[in-house]
Amino acid sequence: MSTGIATVIFALVILGLFLLDRDSKARTSGALWVPVLWLALAGSRAVSQWLAAFGWGSAGTATDLVAQYEEGSPIDRLIYTGLLIIGLALLVGRRRQVASLLRANVPIILFVLYCAVSILWSDYQEVAFKRWTKFLGDLVMILVVLTERDPSAAVKQLIARMAFLLIPLSVLFIKYYPDVGRAYNPWVWTPMYSGVATSKNMLGMICLLCGLGSVWRLLALYRSGDDRCRNRQLIAHGAILVMVLWLFNMANSMTSLSCFILASGLLVAIKFSAIARRPKGVHLLVAGMVIGCFATLFLGVGADVVSDTMARNTTTLTDRTDIWGLVLSMAGNPIFGTGFESFWLGDRLRNIWSVVHGINQAHNGYLEVYLNLGWIGLFFLAVVLVRGYRNIVTAMCRNPDVGSLWLAYFSVAVVYNFTEAAFKMMFPVWIFLLLAIVAAAQECAAMVEPSRLGMASPNPSWTNRRPARKQISEEAV
């Protein structure tokens, strides 16, 4: 099949997915496309990289790339700034809902503010500030989604639109645009498949997040009755899931695949087991998932099985332990770090590339936070995670259908960051973690005082009638 014909067919497939998933009852505005575009860029490539991929720009030499980490692209800066301004303008008109969400998410606000303060001791303050604005943009986009008239429908459409765009295009690029969707490992000269993303690990991340969204929708549709939309939506999300599984096989990203399998199992357990929907059951499931992964990766439990089935070196975690030792030897102040997103810049980056060329992250999210923000940054992150987990469990016990998705994304973020650094600006895992935590806090706030959200009562499509918050919180704690 020629490239032109394949492109037309895939364009029709994408259009068909949107038509199959349409829901006339959904009450969302056109403003939702702003966070969709932000997430699509975060999950694929920056505009300048897309231009370079199709021969309309230059990727630059290795020396230029070091400077590019400091300066960035003017085109990208213009696009991101424009999206951020639009997002802020939308939030001004929804300030009552925004104020309520911010009050319910004080730990996130404190973490974002500490990141801003850390710019003061960065060696590259201008660069750090530019990156912090993108970090702020992640939160702005989440607030745009959750201040829609129907937050539940907005979340469904956000995940679906992201999946319908990025997943089929990844298949198209891998099969018919090899110069865009494929690359070669410079060390062993074997093919690597990246699709719309810039690396196989980024492609795996997109498959993980979109695949979980489709699994969640399929489970929700399984017993949804005779709704006329049901069969159409089953076909759409079933097709996405099939493409995701094919892309997982091509990408060979074991971290994302392992997280997908574990989180999908979590969704299934919550859907079909009453015990899994109780606080104690939730704690056991999540603890088993997190502790099991930690023990396998860092304590050597089941290392032989992992090595045989996944073809990964569990002793060095595919050379990650060497990277950890290298970056720790260059770490700055242990209390405050080097400043927001400032570790991988300048001479430090050049020195690291002289040993391991091309890396720009520590391949461990917790270590990455330590390098940039020190122990104080890790403390703020821990508060965000602990408070977020408590709200998610409370929300899930009240509304398992929606809360299970938040729990899955939360668990994925915790485990994924064992071997990848994803607590970073414009990283989809971080954005979906924020979405889960902020949405759960919104749910908990609606239990206490619905009027704080600017509504007379909780949105019926977002929450179901469950026991009062006080009773649930006592069980969860």
Image (cartoon, rainbow, N blue to C red):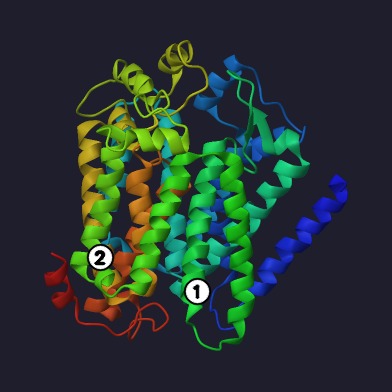
| Residue lying at the far bottom of the rendered structure | 226
Task: Out of 156 and 261, give the one closest to the viewer.
Answer: 261
Q: Secondary structure at mark 1?
A: helix
Where is residue 294 shown, x and y percent of the image?
A: 28, 40
**Image quadrant of residue 419?**
top left
Front residue of this view, candidates 125 and 105? 105
Q: Does 51 sit left or right of 236 as displayed?
A: right
Return the residue at label 2: 393
Circle nearer the N terminus (1, 2):
1
Q: Which mark is residue 153?
A: 1
CB atoms of marks 1 and 2 within 8 Å: no
Could you tell me residue 295's position as x and y percent? 26, 39
Q: Would residue 307 appear left or right of 284 to someone viewing this image? A: right
Q: Residue 302 at what x, y percent from top left?
A: 31, 38
Task: Answer above or below: position of 322 versus 174.
Answer: above
Q: Which mark is residue 70?
A: none
- Give the residue displayed 50% in from the left and 74% down from the top: 153
Q: Secondary structure at mark 2?
A: helix
Q: Amino acid at mark 1?
A: Ala
Q: Label 1 vs label 2: CA separation?
A: 21 Å
Query: What's the residue type where badge 2 is placed?
Result: Val
